[in-house]
Image: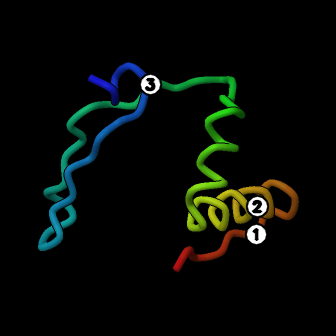
Amino acid sequence: MLLSLHGNGFIRFDRENFSESQIMISAKERNDTNWDIVNRLLKKNKNFFVYIKLIHQFYQTGESHQFD
């Protein structure tokens, strides 16, 4: 219920055979960003902070990097 309420999707990955992975719940596309949620996640999750920095860098430079 919370996934659909917030527009998040859910993908079931098959580790043995990625082509067998399935989208269980499609995400809802949004044109706006909930900055309160983003800031909350940034404070609680260091990996999310690194992810946001990579996105920021991509939009500034067009360069993509692998996320470890």
Name which residue lies at 80% across and 54% down.
59
Disc with the residue nearer the chain's start (1 vs 3): 3
- Name the residue beneath numbered marker 2: 58
Q: Nearer the viewer, residue 13 or 35?
A: 35
Vertical position of residue 3 compared to residue 10: above or below: above
Three-letter code, disc 1: Glu
Vertical position of residue 2 compared to residue 67: above or below: above
Disc with the residue nearer the chain's start (2 vs 1): 2
Badge 2 density bin: few <14, some 14–19, many ≥20, Cα 10 Å: few
- Image quadrant in which you'd find residue 14: bottom left
Name which residue lies at 60% across and 66% down.
46
Three-letter code, disc 2: Phe
- Name the residue beneath numbered marker 3: 6
Which residue occupies the extreme bottom position in the image? 68
- Name the residue beneath numbered marker 1: 63
Name which residue lies at 70% across and 44% down.
39
